[in-house]
Image (cartoon, rainbow, N blue to C red):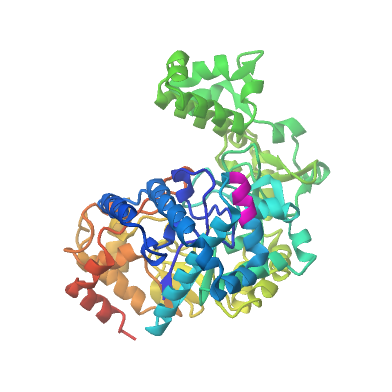
Amino acid sequence: MIQTLPINDTTLRHNNLDSYPYNAVSVFALHPIYINIEKMGKLTPALKKKYEAKKAELNALTFADYQNVYDAKMEFFKALYKQDKDALFATEEYKAFEKKNHAWLEPYAAFLHKRDKQPKEFYKYLQFHADKQLADAVAYAHSIGVAMKGDIPIGISPDSVDAAVYPELFNLDASAGAPPDDFSISGQNWGFPTYNWDEMSKDGFGWWKARFRKMQDYFDAYRIDHILGFFRIWQMRKSDVWGLCGHFVPALPYSYDDLCAQGVCLDWDRMTKPYIRANFLGDVLGFDTEWAKKNALQTRDNYVYWFRPEFDTQAKVQEWADRLLGDEKQLKASGLTEKAVHNICNGLIYLHCEVLFVEDQRRPGWLHPRISIYQSHSFSELYSDQKEVLMRIYNDYFYRRHTSFWRDSAMRKLPTLIGATHMLCCGEDLGMVPACVPDVMHELQILSLEIQRMPKDPTVKFAHPADAPYQSVCTTGTHDMNPLRAWWEEDHAVTQRFYNEQMGWWGDAPKEMTPEIAEFIINQHMYSPAMWTILPLQDWLAIDGDVRIKDQFADRINVPANPRHFWNYRMHLSLEELMKCDKLNAKIKKLTSVR
């Protein structure tokens, strides 16, 4: 099985931010960047010469130069379109494609035509070639016994054709994300609108069914990104930057009277307004404290502070920082360094998160405990009796209150969606997993994701592949994590423990992961009882010291804590070169033949 990241069109900003594959302009359209120009048609001799030169230039790079590749391909796409469109549009093959995909293809083409001013037919032309080439690749994979697994992102872009055509299906005034986890201590804000499930249910989740069925044109299995979102999603205000001040949707919040009845003796402002006091400002802002007091905060007594209007939302703070960092003259005039701007921005956003409860976006007056309140200054300065009361409410909200409620929420959606196709369904069930999730996934035969470095059992440091359930996908890591070799150097104490306890090898763990260690770990996964063991390509290459890349940190694909990360990982050798790596291929063949 080959598992891919999402392959939908993400051309929104026309820069390297579009390299992020989870922010699609359409959940149906394929990304034109993957089209093989040489299989589309015949370039003129002059264009062919130019194409070969550009191809050599871009292929010489050690990274995937996303926007330059896209811009270069678009030049040749337009030339081939002008040259071949009339002949192609007259074919029965093209007419059949357009008829089959009309429901999404027409609004997609119209949307891009209005935005980018190219003819509607140009975008249909590109989608025809993308569809044909991917279908051919899948047919070849099937002919040699290889299955294909796709990836369904949990969100859509607020600037997508889907949001424009079906605005009633989305909460466009909110952002989806994730609470703090191993990937980000401040939580994640993906910038996607959340789903209006009540509206979606009116036609039996037709939009979702169509999305899944389009995936089935190419894939035999699929991964539901953040399957927890079908139980509940972490939702923030559009004015939030971090994920700390979000709350679950759907959820069961508390009224003020509920909280008072449970022993909370705090007024509304103390619970919901940013708690900013002089005694801890220095801990948050360091050397930039005085600047913040003078420019971003207000006070009457030099002890209690609140935000000035121009900094009174997280978004305003971020916009201030982006403005200075994007204009060298403004930065110089401010008297601040880039480092100071970053520090002030993070510090002020942190202060915005100094609340105990977050008000529900749809039900004013109803409150959700802020995630990780016990780590806040606001909480630490409470009397011990109030801390005890709040932690009792906090633990009930996050670990008990919603168990059956979220189960019912998932069961209203997932059976219908899974039943829409014959594809094997896999769920990415990482993060803050509600207690009801494993039972629902088992009941619906959705494969879980098992990662050695992220055990589901909180009492153990590492999971063992041998303990993975049959209904699961077992793996060494995901695109959001460091590959094995770079992980080995993240924390030597963790590595040492893994070396001694998980591997059973004694003495000091080597500073760098040797090919023998990588092979040992992969061999563990090969013996897992999981239905599928699917490993990142980088970890397969790690078992051969002559083949693997020298810089292990260049193997990483994504850094989730950085929403502006440029996805530019590129395999450091071609497929043709890979096929000549006899020693590596012999090892892989041996490892995959253990069962």
Q: Nearer the viewer, residue 94 or 581?
A: 94
Image quadrant in which you'd find residue 339? top left
Near-viewer residue (451 or 378): 451
Relative to 363, does residue 103 appear above or below in the rendering?
A: below
**Which corner quadrant of the image does residue 208 belong to?**
bottom right
- Where residue 409 sits, quadrant-wise, is bottom right
In depth, the one of 22 and 102 nearer the eye is: 102
Decide: is 271 above or below 451: above
Q: How many marks?
A: 0
Judged from this view, the residue extending furthest toward the bottom is: 595
- Quadrant of the snapshot with the N terminus: bottom left
Confirm whether residue 63 shows in the render.
Answer: yes
Residue range corresponding to the magenta coloring: 109-115
In the image, taking residue 339 as reference, residue 116 lies left or right, namely right
Q: Is residue 295 above or below residue 356?
A: above
Residue sitting at 47 percent across and 74 percent down?
135
Q: Quadrant of the C terminus?
A: bottom left
Residue 521 colored in magenta in the image? no
Residue 566, horizontal then vertical, whole percent: 41, 46
**Magenta part, dominant SS:** helix
Does 16 sit above or below residue 126?
Answer: above
Horizontal side of 485 relative to 339 (left or right) equals: left
Left or right of residue 339, residue 236 in this image: right
Identify the residue shown where x is 28% and y is 67%: 575
Q: Position of residue 509 (x, y in %)?
A: 22, 58
- Residue 289 % position (x, y): 50, 20
Q: Is residue 234 visible?
A: no
Task: Estimate the x, y position of residue 29 in percent, counting from the top left.
Answer: 56, 61
